[in-house]
Amino acid sequence: MPSHRVDKYLFGHHPVWTGRDIQALIGERATGGARAADLDVNPLGNRERTVWLNETDAQRAEIVLRYRLFTYHPDEMVTMMSLAQMHPGQGDLDPRMYQYGGLWVYPVGALLRVAGACG
């Protein structure tokens, strides 16, 4: 899991942003609907020219979100994003893992639920 060890690379000598600061900069994450959990929210369009990815605080917050709040392993991150979008109480059991299936999401979710109940 991410830790404060990476803060020096993400923030340098600037104050470290809190999760609330990051959320305020990037806003609510679009969830729900038929959008796949592993789909890039803002893919690069034109690859013929230079694209600045860190020009604004909001763009920098997206980078920090990726490297500070997500797990380091892509499959873990996508699994957590998939679980976050599911709402079993409302009958929404679609893992939104269309690229390579999502059957493993259910036991992972059940294990996390049990672990949470155990503290």
Image (cartoon, rainbow, N blue to C red):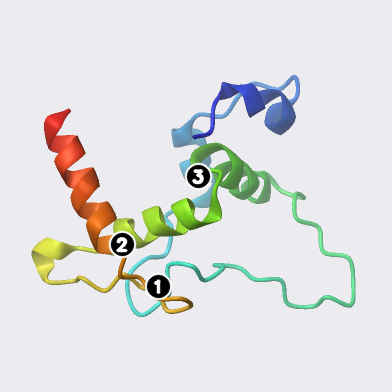
Mark 1 or 2, nearer chain start: 1
Q: Nearer the viewer, mark 3 or mark 2?
A: 2
**Image-based side of 31 in relation to 69, left or right:** left
When the figure is inspected, residue 103 is found, relative to residue 108, above or below; the finding is: below
Query: Which secondary structure, mark 3?
Result: loop
**Image-based side of 25 in relation to 51, left or right:** left
Q: Position of residue 116 (x, y in %)?
A: 19, 36
Name the residue: 54% across, 45% down: 25
Q: Residue 29: which numbered mark, if any? A: none
Query: Which secondary structure, mark 2?
Result: helix
Q: Quadrant of residue 6?
A: top right
**Looking at the image, which is closer to me, 50 or 7?**
7
Name the residue: 40% across, 58% down: 79
* Label 3, residues with CA under 10 Å away: few <14, some 14-19, many ≥20: some
Q: Residue 70: which numbered mark, if any? A: 3
What whole-number distance in Å separates the C-alpha atoms at marks 3 and 2?
17 Å
Name the residue: 75% across, 55% down: 53
Q: Which residue matches tag 2?
A: 105
Image quadrant containing the C terminus: top left
Query: Which secondary structure, mark 1?
Result: loop
Q: Which residue matches tag 1?
A: 97
Mark 1 or 3, nearer chain start: 3
Asked whether the beta carbons under mark 1 and mark 2 sit within 8 Å of each other, the answer is yes
Q: Position of residue 114 (x, y in %)?
A: 15, 42
Name the residue: 38% across, 53% down: 80
Q: Position of residue 21 (x, y in %)?
A: 50, 35
What whole-number distance in Å separates the C-alpha atoms at marks 1 and 3?
17 Å
Q: Amino acid at mark 3?
A: Phe
Q: Amino acid at mark 1?
A: Met
Q: Position of residue 118 (x, y in %)?
A: 13, 31
Asked whether the beta carbons under mark 1 and mark 3 sit within 8 Å of each other, the answer is no
